[in-house]
Every structure is written in C-alpha cells, then in structure tokens.
Amino acid sequence: MPKTMFKLDLSKPMEGQAHPGHNRWHPDIPAAFSVNPGTAFRMECKEWTDGQIQNNDSPNDVRDVNLERVHVLSGPVYVNGAKPGDLLVVDILDIGAFQEYEWGFNGIFAKENGGSFLVDHFPEAQKSIWDFEGIYTTSRHVPGVKFAGIIHPGLIGVAPSLELLNEWNRREEALKATNPDREPPLANLPTPESAVLGTLKGADFDRVAKEGARTVPPRENGGNCDIKNLSKGSRIFFPVFVDGAKLSVGDLHFSQGDGEITFCGGIEMSGWIDLKVDVIKGGMEKYMIKNNPVFKPGPVDPLYTDFLVFEGVSVDEKDGKQHYLDANIAYRRACLNAIDYLKTLGYTGEQAYMLLSSAPVEGHVAGIVDIPNACCTVALPTQIFEKDIMPK
Amino acid sequence: MPKTMFKLDLSKPMEGQAHPGHNRWHPDIPAAFSVNPGTAFRMECKEWTDGQIQNNDSPNDVRDVNLERVHVLSGPVYVNGAKPGDLLVVDILDIGAFQEYEWGFNGIFAKENGGSFLVDHFPEAQKSIWDFEGIYTTSRHVPGVKFAGIIHPGLIGVAPSLELLNEWNRREEALKATNPDREPPLANLPTPESAVLGTLKGADFDRVAKEGARTVPPRENGGNCDIKNLSKGSRIFFPVFVDGAKLSVGDLHFSQGDGEITFCGGIEMSGWIDLKVDVIKGGMEKYMIKNNPVFKPGPVDPLYTDFLVFEGVSVDEKDGKQHYLDANIAYRRACLNAIDYLKTLGYTGEQAYMLLSSAPVEGHVAGIVDIPNACCTVALPTQIFEKDIMPK
Amino acid sequence: MPKTMFKLDLSKPMEGQAHPGHNRWHPDIPAAFSVNPGTAFRMECKEWTDGQIQNNDSPNDVRDVNLERVHVLSGPVYVNGAKPGDLLVVDILDIGAFQEYEWGFNGIFAKENGGSFLVDHFPEAQKSIWDFEGIYTTSRHVPGVKFAGIIHPGLIGVAPSLELLNEWNRREEALKATNPDREPPLANLPTPESAVLGTLKGADFDRVAKEGARTVPPRENGGNCDIKNLSKGSRIFFPVFVDGAKLSVGDLHFSQGDGEITFCGGIEMSGWIDLKVDVIKGGMEKYMIKNNPVFKPGPVDPLYTDFLVFEGVSVDEKDGKQHYLDANIAYRRACLNAIDYLKTLGYTGEQAYMLLSSAPVEGHVAGIVDIPNACCTVALPTQIFEKDIMPK
Amino acid sequence: MPKTMFKLDLSKPMEGQAHPGHNRWHPDIPAAFSVNPGTAFRMECKEWTDGQIQNNDSPNDVRDVNLERVHVLSGPVYVNGAKPGDLLVVDILDIGAFQEYEWGFNGIFAKENGGSFLVDHFPEAQKSIWDFEGIYTTSRHVPGVKFAGIIHPGLIGVAPSLELLNEWNRREEALKATNPDREPPLANLPTPESAVLGTLKGADFDRVAKEGARTVPPRENGGNCDIKNLSKGSRIFFPVFVDGAKLSVGDLHFSQGDGEITFCGGIEMSGWIDLKVDVIKGGMEKYMIKNNPVFKPGPVDPLYTDFLVFEGVSVDEKDGKQHYLDANIAYRRACLNAIDYLKTLGYTGEQAYMLLSSAPVEGHVAGIVDIPNACCTVALPTQIFEKDIMPK
C-alpha cells in the first residue's frame, strides 16, 4: 500500500491534529509534506464538518452546524518540481471508509443556516444516516433502497496564486454586495472565524485567515466540484498556480447524486484516499487547460443502466414566471417532479429529497438553446429500489 | 411493420403534403388520424426546417433560414379514449433515416437569426453535413471523428389545453416584454407568419395561427425537449390535456450532444418513427406526473464508457463577473473549455462547437449548491476520435 | 443508403432468384457481383431454411425440415484486389428485418432430423414464433419476456481455397467414419441433394455440388460462427484464401443466446445487411490472422447488466460419469440448471430451452483448468422478464 | 466494518495459524466459528499455495510448487439454522488486498507438475508478478498493460454431505483409472499428503485426510469455480448439504481472465473478504437449485466495452483432427489465435498466455450446435493496452 503521508486522529478537531490540515484556500498555507512526481501516497480525511454531525436520529446538529468550519481538508501536498504553467496529473488510485466508521450522513440545511437547492420547499433541517456494508449502503431514514457507492472526493484542488485569490475575493465580494443580507447568503467571504491553516501561527495566521478564500465553491483550482464520477480510477489534470502545486483533498462522499442538492450533501464520510501525482511541464498552455481541471473518470462506476427520468423547464414553480434558459430552475423543476413522484411511492418529501442527493442519480443539461426554456433531466436508477417503481 | 399512418413527400413543403402536419401548438389543430390504445404505427417526419438546409458546403442557408417555419411536425395523432387527467404511454419502437436521404446537418445560427448557446463567441453562421453509414456517422466538415448515433426525436409532445396554451402565451409575453428588442430574442411569440396548421382553413386557421404557441421551447406537454437519450426503445409517460391527447412528433436527430448547443442543432434529419401508444386512466394524479413528461430510456444507447471531462463554473468569461449558482454559465464555461482543448488537437473553434452539439456528449449538473458557483461538466467520449486525445 | 447489390424475392426459393445465392462452400461458385475496396452495399438475405418454416403454431415444419437445403446464403461478393494472404476487412454497417416480414422463429430440431444441444432431454421438435416490434421482440409461445435484439448474421464467411476445402472434407469424413450411423450425425458431408450454387450449371454444378462443403460448421473462413455479438457496428478481419475473397452472408438472427443451443437456432429471420469492405494487403502474416477471423464488436448492444447466473461442471447428468475438462458438458449442465430454474417460474422445459437459445443470454467458459471439472456459466438477463425472477 | 471472524498470520503456514483453515472438502472438518443468518463478517485468506510463491523474477517456485497443499481455505463457517435442503444466501460485501501485501502472481505450471490449458505449447514453468496500485494492476513481467481488477474469490463453497463426498470420490477415481499415469493427471484423488483440516487431530484427522476431496475442481458445492464475475457486490445461492452449511472461501484473485488458462491462475493474492449470510428454508426444492450454486453478479465490474475478439473451432491444432463439438478445443484454439496475435505486438508467447489468464478477458461459448465444430471466442479489452492494438 502507499505510505500514509497525512494521518488523522478522528476524535480530535482538525486544529488538534499532529499536523493540522486547513479549511481555507491561500498560497501561503504551508505544505504538510512533499513528494516527487511518480509517487503514490495515502491521505486520511475527516468528513467535511470536522465531526459536528453524529450518527443519531436528530437533525439538530445539521440545523446548528458551524459552517465557518467547513471544509476541513487534508494537505497541502507539495509536488517537487511542479511550477506555475505546468499540469499536475493526479491519479485517484483508491478511496475507502475507515473500518471503524462505516457510516455517513446526508442532511438538508436549514434556510437560516446554509440553505439548499430546494430551500423554499424544504426550509427545515433534516438528516439521514447511511450505513455502509461493503460496496453497498442503506439508511434507516430512507427505507427501501440499497445501492453501490461511487466513492469520490467532493473536494480536491490546488492552491491559488495570490493574484488568483485576489480575483476570487474581488468577484465574490461584488456579488455579495448586490444583496448583502440575503439568507442564505449569495457568497461566503473570507473570515478568520473557525479558520484552520495548517501550521501557520501568529501574524501569518491572522493575515492568511483574513485573506483566505472559503472552500465552498468550486473554482479555477478545482476545489469543491462535487463531481460524483471523479471516483476511484480517475485521472485529473490540474492547472498549477504556485510552486509545488499544493494539492489538498477532503469532503469524501460514499455516494452523491448529480447536483448534491441538499447541500449537506452527498453521503458525507471520513476515510482515506490513495493518490499518485505526476507533472506535465508547460501543460497549461500546450493543452489549454487553464480555467478549470480536466479529468478522465475511472472504469468502476456501478453498472446501473435502467432509469426513470424526470424533466424540468425554466418556469418558476412559485409564480409561473418564465425565465430565460435558466438551467438552475430547470434542474430544480426536474428534481421537484421526481420528489412528487417518489411521494406517490410512500416517501416523505424530505426522504425523497435526501435520496436524490445521495443516490447515483444522473442530472443532465438536455437542451440549453430552445428559448426561453432550458430543459434539464434527473434520472433515478430503478435498480436501487427494492420494488418496481415504474408507472403501470 | 407498423402501418404508415402519416406519409410525406419530402420534395414538398409541409403545407403541400396530402395531409399537412403543423408547426404550432394549439388544441384546435385537427388530428391527422386516430388510433386505439395498444396500436403501433409509423409516422414519417421532415427535418425541422422543412427542407431549407441543403447538403452542400455553404452555410448561407443556415444564415438565412426562416425560423418562423420551424418545427414542422407530423401529427397530431388522436388516441381514442385518452382524456385529460390520463397518462399517455408512448413507446418509441424504432427510428430511422430514409434510405434515399442518409445525411443530416448541424449548424451554428447567426446572432441576427436565432443565435446559439455560445453566440457571443460564434456570431457567424456555420454548417456541417454528416453522412450516415449504417449506425455510424462522419462529416467532411469535422474530420477525424466517427460515432454511432443515438437516434431520437428532438420534439415529441401532446396538445395543450386552451387554458394551458393561454398560460404559455402569458408567461412568454411577459418575459419578452422585459427586453423586446433583444437579439436573439428572449422568446418567440405566436405569429401567423409561415404557420402550418394541418387541415385548418379560413377563420379557424387565422385564429389558431394567431394564438398557437411556437414549438421552440419544451413545456408541460413535452415538446422540443431535445433529450438525446429519448431514443429507440424508450417509453414516455405524457400528461394528457385534451381529448385524444393529440400526439405530435418531429425534429428527428441522428445524434445530439447534451444541450444541443449550436441550436441547429443535433444532427438534423428527415426519417420515420415507429410508435405504440397506450393510456393509463387517471395517471396524472395517481403518479403526480402533471408538470412534464417522465420517461424510461431504451436499452440500446452506444456503449461509450471512456470520457475526457471538462468542468465549468458560473463566472462570466467576458468580464470575470461572479454569478450565483448559474448552471447556464457553468455549462457554457465547460463547453468553452472543451472547445479550447479541441483546438489544441487541430480543430477550428467552429468545428469543435459543432462536434459538441452533434456527438453523444454528456452534460451534467455536477454541483448546484456550492455558493456561489454551480459546477457543470461536459464529457467527450474518447472512443469517437480516430486518434488518442488524452493529454500526455 | 448503400445500393442493394443482392436482391431477393422472398416468395421464391433460392434457386429461383434472379441471381441465386448458394448453400455450399466452394471456391468455384461464381461471384454474384464485384465491388472495390471502400464500397458499402446492401445484400438481402433469406432465413436459413429457404422459407420452410411458417408463422403458425405447429412444429411440424421444424420436424420435417429439409436440412440439405441449409444455409441459403447471399453472395459471393468478389472484392477487387483481394488476394490470398490479405485480410478482408468487413464493416457491418447495419442490419434489419424486412418491413413486411417482421417475425422470426426458434425451433428445437427433432432427434431424428438435426437434433440439438440437449437432444436427449428434448428429442421432439418444437417451435416458437417471435414478433418484432421495433427493437423489441416477444413471442406468443414464450410469454412474459420482451427484449431488444442484438441483430447479427449467424453466418458470414469467405470462400475456401481448394486446398482448404479438401482439408475440411478430409477431416470431417474421418470424424464421421468413426460412427457413420449416429443420429444425429457427427458431421454433414458434401451432398448434391438440394445444393444451390449460384449460376453454376451442368458439369461444373455437378462437380461443385459433390465437393462443396456444407455450411453448417464454422471453420477457418468464418462461416456459421453464430456469434451473437457480431452485430451491427462490428468490424471483422477475414483471412483471404481465394482471389476476390468471395464473401457470403446469411442466417440472420434477430437475437441469439450464446451457444444457439436449440440449433434452430437464434431467432431466425429474413432481412437485409449493409456491409462495407476493405483490404489489408499481406495482413494474414503481418497480424497472424490465419486460422479464423478476428473481430471488434459494435457499440450498440443492449445495455443489460443485471443477470442471474447458472453454473455447470463436466459431470454427465445421465450417469454421473466424470469427464475431463469437458466444456461442452459443463455448458450443458449450466443450461439444464437454468431450465430447471425457469420451470419453477412456470415455463415448460421447451419454452425455457427456446428462451435460452433466443434471448441475449451470456455463456462463459469460467474455469477450464481445474481438473477434472470445467466450469461454464449461463447468465440470464433479468431485465427481459416481466416479473422479478430472483430467489427470495 | 464487519468483525474479523477468521484471522491469519501471513508469515505462518495454514496449519500454524491460531485457528487453522483447511485444504480438503469433508463434512467432518470442524467449523471455525458460527454466525446467525443476517450477520456480516470478515475473513482473512491466504493465497492458494499457502505462501509458496515469492515476489521475485524466478519461476522456480512455480515449477516446484507442492500442489498437495492447495487450496488453503478460510473457514468453515457454521450458519446457525441452515439445514440440508435450504439455500445459503451469501453476499460478497467487499474484498481487498492486505495493505502490506499489495501484489499477486500468475504462473504457468510445468507439464510435470500441474500443467495448464495450453500445456503442450507451454510445458515450462513461468511466472509474472503483478503490483497493485489502488484499483489497478501492472506487471514488470508483462509490460504495456494496466487494468482495473475484478477482485473475486476463485473458490467459495459449502461442505458436501458424506454421501455427496463419496459420489465425488467414486466418479473421479473412475476417471483417473482410465489413464492412471497421465501427466498431468486426469484427477487429483484424496491424499493425506499436506492435508490441513482445521482443528482435527488424531484418528479423525487421519480418516478425514484419507477421505477428503481435493479442492481443485468445482463441484455441486460450488468450490473452485474460478468465475471472474463472482466479484464484490455479488449474491450467491448455495445448496446446503450439511447442518450449518459450513461455508469456506479462499483463492482470492485480484483479476482473472475467463478460463484461468495458465492454471496458476488469475492474479493470485492474499486478502480479506467481507461476507453476509442468510438462509432460504427449503429453497433447494422450491427453486430447483440442487446441482450447483446460482448467483447474481455485483454492479461494479470495470466498464470495459471495447474488445478485439478471437475465434476458435474444435479442430486439433496438432494434427488437424476434427473433434465433435468440443468446446475445450475450440476455446484453446481461440486462445492460441489471441496469443499469435499478441506476439505480433511484441509479446512473448508466455507473456501473452499469462495476460490472457490475468486480465478481464471474456471467454464465450458462441455456437455449440453447428456440427461438428463448436465455436468459442476470447475477447481482449483493448482499453487495457497502452497502445492501439487494432489491425490497420
């Protein structure tokens, strides 16, 4: 096995680890370790909230979660020889749960604390616990389904340059300024509150905590992309913005539906990930991979091939207002249609919502030009249900 | 074989057919024929522009296309016994090209006449012709690729009730009114210009032509969903809004990438489709299928499993402005990233753009909650390229 | 569409066609037409018995079939420039049923006339008619199943050289001589009875009829391989033994299970096939493709992924005798186990047997070294059954 | 994680373990532990030769292997309440390598000691070491290939009744007696030599060692089926022959090609397996699962879909002799054809042979009725090769 280069004690918070990880993006967060290109290594990861959510039946921990704490990441890894302009090649060799923590959680964030994709329909916090049994998972809170996980890191990314970081902060502040009091907020700006920054201390800590970008959105560095097919066996090509690339990873999901619609999230878990890194010199320009990472999915995703598919278009369900090619609304309508259908099978709306966020559900942009309606689809794998779910 | 119930002469425009089809949605367009539940039948379809695009190397016909003419549809079919509140079950038994017209086209609409998803990057009209060779297609205008088609109807839907039609017109007019002079327009409102309405004549024709909704957007009745996996072997469940359901179909695609991003469109073709219909009485309420159709894809989509995937987030590429969970921008960025990459392989931007719109490209909503960035992905099947396209 | 180069009148026997095909292998059977490399063309094919089996409910036509008549083939095609030592590249562009004959048959041959894989268990003739509905088939004789066909030519091959033909006749005569009166026979030797030899006449006809190998077995030239995945989209590489290669094709199957165990056979049908040919000069030596063809399957086989799998080992079920790594017995036992299981679902043995021979059933050589038992498996796709077939 | 109920010290031979496993089948081998239906548990397994093969470049250990020692199994597990006539339901929840032994081996047995499927072509011992890197494996002895493993137990089975055991011994002795001196032998009969029988001692040991069936062949109890798709996520239904069913498992493979043609074998490894058991009372009669186990494969096999397929027919390559529907010879010819082809790519025959035995190669019984030739195919996944392997 690859050597464990980032080791955690799950009973302690991230700042209490032998080598703490981090929960902000900043070029000055010190590397936790360095490796040469061609090296494989293991990193251990805590679930994204740093242990705030418990394996019980109360959603209160989801309701009251401290979101300044997310996402606690493992790393950064300094890859020797990687320079700005290169591509960092990352192979996800394998991922797994810890044998003593074979469970995960999905939750709906409350409107007042995080919110979610369908926040106006589901403003209250809710939680489901998912037990892992080998490759499968089931939940006492969402009965009648069982599926194989497509385990993946919800978040994997490299450090931004200072210039890029400044650009992030500029553009997100500008957005937030358009409606600073909105609940949930339009953007999460840098805050020293609950910041964990590796081994940084003193004035450096204070400066980086004040400048460091939150890890919530995906950006040019990859980050919190929540791509369910970025699973074991995948190869990712990251643009490199700083010396050593400074790769970090976390937010492991046992499974996730496209969109991660409840926000919290896929099936969130602690676990380990085996990575291997390499460098393509000058690859950013050569392959024009500059704006975002590119990847090749692995070959072992579950073979679900039988789906029931729901469509949605960009008309607001609340007021019947027509929007222009709005894929967000179209996907929301598709998800709401799926939830309405699942309710006819006996699920509560909350169960159906968490199932869509947890199971290997496929969300597609079907048509994005047929003015004024975008058409999005959400596809439920029928083989995950104990009973036949087709209309008769 | 199923009996051909809707027959066309491809050399004549739709209004010149023995029984003309239609290019507007309205409950009063007379049925072309009626069938009992359980019946299979064949319908012939013209490509969506009614023959305006030629198999040649000039994009001028795409540039100058009369868009008031689209989409010429075959039908409506009156299904005996179908009543509002029922579900119409439609099996797509098979679809094919005509043996004497084994080619199709993809085109980029000009900004002044239709526009497209990447209109600001590609404002000029362009065209590619795709030749069919059995299950495969290739193009002299986009060399180096060959793929199996997932043939599907871009448009299939049922007639709206008058009430539903009025709602469509209301909401689309309201959108258009927010920026009536925008180019391309925010919505296409009803117009008698180039309307084809089956056998309607006189005052009825004039009234319906004035009221009938354009077929461009997908809506509650299905319609122009442009879902590439709604292919042969699929079963669709439509809500029924009028007596007889009044099913119509057209806009056949030999293949399409998710999003149909050039607008014109997938690989557009004339051809035939074999359908079988049935009715689930009272199914709309029982299964809560009221807002949009639901479907089960067929089992014979091509087995492409090896992809190169591009990501995009909701930051506008033109001004770096941050948008809030905008999946439209995120998908646009992903497509632009893919085009940049394909250009490093020797394609022009226009070729790459048309390829993304034509090949079995997968577009996913990956993450839609990680404020403020939506993350969308576009996945290129690597097996369709003659050469290895992976970064090295 | 490709030009139809071999046209049939299905109401007439093969010798009565404008250009008759053939039902023997011999280098001197004249080519029906010639094509240049790079050419696509269509050939029409009669079902293998030349019209002896009817769409009705009596198995008598299967019982009494004239097996000297099989397989009536279309061709040969002379490929200009192909020489012995080359590889003939054949693309199967598409295959389909005739619109006016959308049905096929499966039959169990009687022990006295053909026999089958499980002849001692099912010595009587039986028949099932399968109706095609687009990509799907169902049978009034085997209820409760519906599946998408993997249409393929059971038989496609090139002409042998005279030397190779002599070798075939030598080795098959030697086998037959070991038990000349066995029923069913060990081999079908050349016979002028019911021979059809294209346009040959007179003394040439008599000589070739006497020498020509029967088409029943697959051999070095390909021929009756009955490979269910040699379906549309496939590319085959044939060794070339005579000038022009002389490609022939027939025995179309709408679907077949691995092994084609009832002998008659898959779902046998008349239809058309679109082929495209090319030549790799000197390819036999270069790629060491000398003994048998090599192929690449097409990408549109049905996406069945959920199977129930039955195992068998090489112990004779009749007397409990142990055989040495006998994969034939092992596969037979696996099939018998599957039939026993299907009987618990309400099927008769004959229905189950014909289903295994008709549906897209997968037969694998699992272990072939674990002395003394070979282990073979037969896998039933569960998605083809109307009801859940799993043990509970 | 499931509790580890069978723990091993890999540095010690099987008889030296705290609780030894066994390498013979006999109803009187004491259970290692018992579980209730519904229980999940982990078992550790040694590679099948009990540590005789080393991670080095010499094939001498394969040449000199003590085959009386195989297969060292973990178990038996006594399932409370299971009675003869029931079905034992076994879920393979997960399987993995030990982190400190992430490698496996494939070997060709020498003709004088074991032999293999192509023993007359490859009479000398050979070995390849395969290194695991997450889900992938590569070999310094077979360069240019990399593939994802379908990890599976080559051997999993229940104890025979004494009656069934006697039947095994009877029939295998009868076979062996037909040619007692054959090299390799026709069958491996019971021998006390190197027997390991759990905690049995004294006279009981001696009796059971003398009677116990060798584990080499698959039989009615499952056993050494070497089915590559019996991988993680699978559910197996075993007939129960003794109280408690007495389930044993071992011979883990990281990957295997259909047929396991080198005999030694797949990619042989030590590791752990997580199982869950349940019982269907009276299921043998109800479902007619009496002769062999039945299973449902798991959903996470690698998504290889692009193959190059080689055919073979039942003509002996040594003397050109025609055999009657002999699937063993047909599969051998297909494998030899594949090896000939792989040699044109630069592999030695031995490398090609070991690759066919190790990679996820598909072996099908294509046609088994076309007298006198069976047709078998062997399909190489092209995506496992670094370079394009298609003929041009």
Image (spheres, coloured by chain):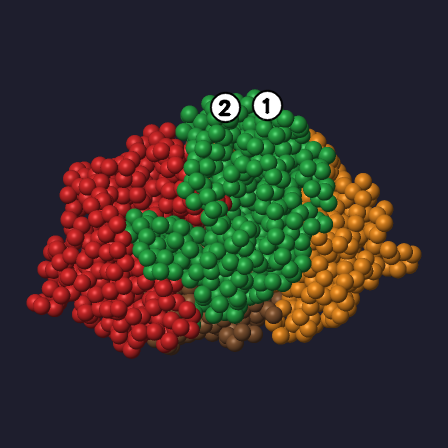
Chain colours: A brown, B orange, C green, D red
Mark seen at residue C80 = 1
Q: Tell me which residue sits at (24%, 60%) in the image.
A: D169
Reading the image, the residue beneath label 2 is: C84
- To the question of a shared chain for discs 2 and 1, the answer is yes
Farthest residue, direction front = C181
Circle 2 Cα neighbour tier, 10 Å, few/some/many (<14 / 14–19 / ≥20): some
Question: From the viewer's perspective, is residue A33 above or below residue B122?
Answer: below
Q: Does residue D194 appear left or right of residue C209 in this picture?
A: left
Q: Residue C144: give x, y in percent of width and height.
A: 57, 65
User: Is residue D74 visible in this depiction of the protein?
Assistant: no
Q: Does residue B71 appear left or right of residue D5 in this picture?
A: right
Image quadrant holding the C terminus of chain B, namely top left
Q: Are marks 2 and 1 in contact (CB under 8 Å)?
A: no
Using the image as rendered, state which of residue C266 and residue B255 is in the foreground: C266
User: Is residue D51 visible in this depiction of the protein?
Assistant: yes
- Label 1 sits on a secondary structure element that is loop
Q: Residue A347: give x, y in percent of width and height.
A: 50, 74
Q: Tell me which residue sits at (13%, 55%) in the image.
A: D194
Identify the chain of the residue marked 2, using the numbered disc in the image: C
Using the image as rendered, state which of residue D145 and residue A241 is in the foreground: D145
Circle 1 Cα neighbour tier, 10 Å, few/some/many (<14 / 14–19 / ≥20): some
- Label 2 sits on a secondary structure element that is loop
Q: Amino acid at mark 1?
A: Asn
Please give the count of numbered marks on the rendered protein: 2
Question: From the viewer's perspective, is residue D118 above or below residue C81?
Answer: below
Q: Tell me which residue sits at (65%, 44%) in the image.
A: C50
Using the image as rendered, state which of residue B77 and residue A199 is in the foreground: B77
Identify the chain of the residue marked 1, using the numbered disc in the image: C
Using the image as rendered, state which of residue D222 and residue C332 is in the foreground: C332
Q: Does residue B105 appear left or right of residue B375 in this picture?
A: right
Q: Quadrant of residue C63?
A: bottom right
